[in-house]
């Protein structure tokens, strides 16, 4: 006997055909520029196509010409690690402290974290300039000092990723239960709160890496050598290599954002275990029970 399948459409949800069309259109918007960049890097100066520009990027004899590119990449990786440390060691405990002990300050913190998005980057640099003048006179003007400015830039995204998980896990109840059992605040933070917001921490970390590796305005106006400023210098002498490195950085940022989206998916619901099969009752036992 076959069961008739009744397909009920959810109100407000597009049909599968419309959903596929939207996904394909959005994918084309992202893939067409990447394919054009790849085609440009494969062009040979003598005509035709080849991998000459890709091999030149990793050739030892070109190391001196691409020194600024390697320096910019190294500085960006160091900045990414320092900024990630600021997010995990400073922002995360502060967000948890406000959420647990000072809930009245949450609205003020929400407003404060929106400001780096609302204020243009060039205006932020104008405010950073006198601060970095003092920093340069005290600790030097190394590229690592940009991590302070990058911490401000990534604050809105890191805060939203962590705060949403804190609200969903009911952190106050867990923290009070752990404190009632004698756990200290560092233990509560590391062994109770952090495992519950691991998806938010991972998302904040990946977004931080993507923002730091792709930032240009602040580092350019503050005269620091990073990956993006080095690409601008290389593009003036060798545009093919600059486009190749830009393509690699875009693919890396896309992979990071895909990982972020994967961390936000809800876990799959487990299928209920099948009920144990009922064993047949022997006829003699059944007759004896009926006779009773």
Image (spheres, grey):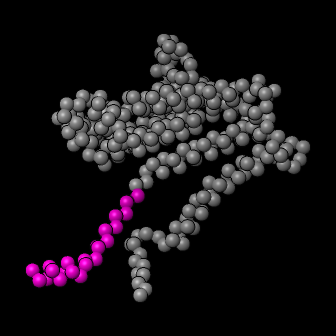
Q: Nearer the viewer, residue 122 or 218?
A: 218
Task: Check residue 273 for magenta coloring.
Answer: yes
Magenta-colored segment: predominant secondary structure: loop
Quadrant for residue 188, please give it. Answer: top left
Where, by quadrant of the figure, is residue 100 drawn?
top left
Q: In this view of the protein, which residue sits in the foreground, 46 or 179?
A: 179
Residue at (48% x, 47% y) in the render: 260
The tally of labels here is 0
State the residue in front, 21 or 136: 21
Q: Position of residue 145 (x, y in %)?
A: 51, 22
Q: Residue furthest top?
A: 138
In this rendering, is residue 8 above or below 268?
below
- 258 relative to 243 in the view: left or right: left
Residue at point 31% right, 38% down?
193
Q: Is residue 103 above or below residue 274?
A: above
- Left or right, residue 51 beside residue 22: right
Q: Which residues are magenta?
A: 268-292
């Amino acid at each position: 006997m076959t069961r008739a399948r009744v397909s009920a459409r959810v109100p407000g949800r597009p049909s599968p055909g419309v959903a596929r069309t939207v996904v394909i259109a959005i994918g084309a918007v992202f893939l067409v520029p990447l394919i054009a960049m790849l085609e440009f890097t494969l062009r040979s100066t003598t005509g035709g196509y080849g991998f000459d520009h890709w091999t030149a990027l990793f050739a030892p004899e070109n190391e001196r010409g691409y020194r600024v590119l390697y320096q910019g990449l190294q500085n960006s990786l160091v900045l990414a690690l320092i900024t990630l440390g600021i997010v995990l060691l400073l922002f995360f405990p502060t967000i948890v402290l406000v959420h647990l002990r000072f809930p009245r300050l949450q609205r003020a913190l929400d407003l404060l974290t929106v400001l780096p998005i609302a204020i243009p980057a060039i205006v932020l640099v104008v405010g950073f300039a006198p601060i970095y003048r003092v920093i340069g006179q005290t600790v030097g003007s190394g590229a690592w000092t940009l991590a302070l400015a990058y911490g401000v830039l990534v604050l809105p995204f890191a805060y939203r990723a962590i705060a949403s998980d804190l609200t969903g896990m009911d952190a106050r109840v867990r923290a009070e239960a752990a404190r009632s059992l004698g756990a200290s605040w560092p233990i509560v933070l590391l062994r109770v709160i952090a495992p519950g917001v691991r998806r938010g921490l991972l998302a904040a970390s990946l977004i931080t890496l993507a923002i730091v590796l792709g930032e240009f305005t602040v580092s350019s106006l503050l005269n620091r050598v990073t990956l993006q400023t080095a690409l601008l210098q290389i593009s003036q002498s060798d545009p093919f290599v600059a486009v190749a490195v830009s393509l690699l950085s875009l693919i890396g940022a896309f992979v990071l954002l895909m990982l972020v989206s994967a961390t936000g998916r809800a876990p799959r619901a487990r299928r209920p275990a099948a009920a144990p099969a009922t064993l047949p009752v022997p006829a003699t036992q059944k007759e004896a029970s009926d006779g009773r």
